[in-house]
Image: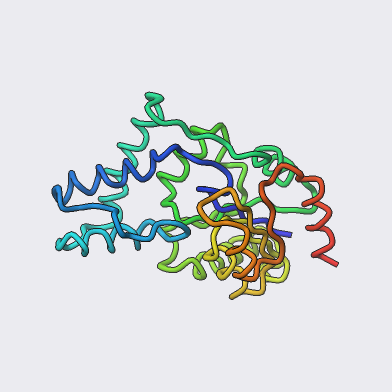
Amino acid sequence: MLVLFDIDGTLLQTGGAGVSSFSQAGKHLYGSRFTLDGVVLAGRLDGSIHRDAAQAAGVDPSSDEGFCAEYSKRLGTLLETGARRSEVLPGARAFVNHIATSDVHTCGVLTGNWSQSGRLKLEAAGLDPDRFAVQAWAEDSNTRSGLVEVALRRWRQKGGSGEGADAVIVGDTPHDVRCGQAHGCRTLAVATGPVDRTELEAAGADRVVDDLEDFSTLLDWLGASQS
């Protein structure tokens, strides 16, 4: 089974470093009118957030690559200097480590982060990005559902079945739930992000938990979902 983890609000939190760096990068490139106020952030792709915020400021967005480089530079500085910290959420490290070393699971990441900034967040939290054998980042598709297609294809190339029914999406927003549902994946929603249990349950997640701490129970659930 392929287990695909979201990053922000699921595996870690950065104390606002991502939002602050994104906003600073926008103001540097576009001027003081650039703001993230009123722009939906949770569960969305960085490229979509970039374009929405630029358009709201009345400017034509630059390439995602150029913006990502500026954003990642500022994010790296905040995290390296300790001005903001990237911290692993309860149970996430042990769960990832177990999946990554399992003989029956493949550990993956599926996130709205660009790879450059997402890897910075993981590394700052002490999580090795290369432990995720299958990776799908914001630059790989224009939609979160498209990222699932990318992940399943890359898993197939590594010898996995490549079937949605054999994959589980782990995330903290209804966006994570819906992208999994669109491909027949099981969905595990964790209420460690900005969305509460009620909304995650309403989105139709197959299982909703407060955090990933009781990962032995979650492993039993993963095994049952394969039967």
The answer to whether 152 is drawn above or below residue 100 in the figure is below
Q: Taking 90 as reference, is 181 above or below it? A: below
Q: How many marks?
A: 0
Foreground residue among 62 and 154: 62
Left or right: where does residue 219 sit relative to residue 160?
A: right
Q: Which quadrant of the view contains residue 75? A: top left
178 on left or right of 206: left
Instruction: Specify the quadrant of the image occupied by residue 148.
Output: bottom right
How has the structure been colored for display? rainbow
Locate residue 199 relative to residue 184 in the image: left or right. left
- Answer with left or right where residue 43 lies relative to residue 54: right
Work out which quarter of the rendered image holds the N terminus and state it: bottom right
Please, is residue 40 above or below residue 9 in the view?
Answer: below
- Give the percent coordinates (x, y) of residue 78: 35, 31
Place of residue 48 in the rendered image (x, y in percent of width and height, measured from the top left): 35, 63
Q: Residue furthest front?
A: 198
Residue at position x 50%, y 55% in the image: 111
Q: State the residue in front, 63 or 159.
A: 63
Residue 70 in percent (x, y) is at 27, 43
- Residue 83 rendering spot, x and y as whole percentages: 37, 27
Identified at 61% across, 70% down, the residue is 202
Q: Which residue lies at the image location 54% right of the left edge and 60% below the top edge? A: 173
Q: Quadrant of the C terminus?
A: bottom right
The foreground one among 101 and 144 is 144
User: Most extreme residue toward the top, as rendered?
Assistant: 81
Q: Nearer the viewer, residue 162 or 121?
A: 121
Which of the 4 quarters of the picture holds residue 20? top left
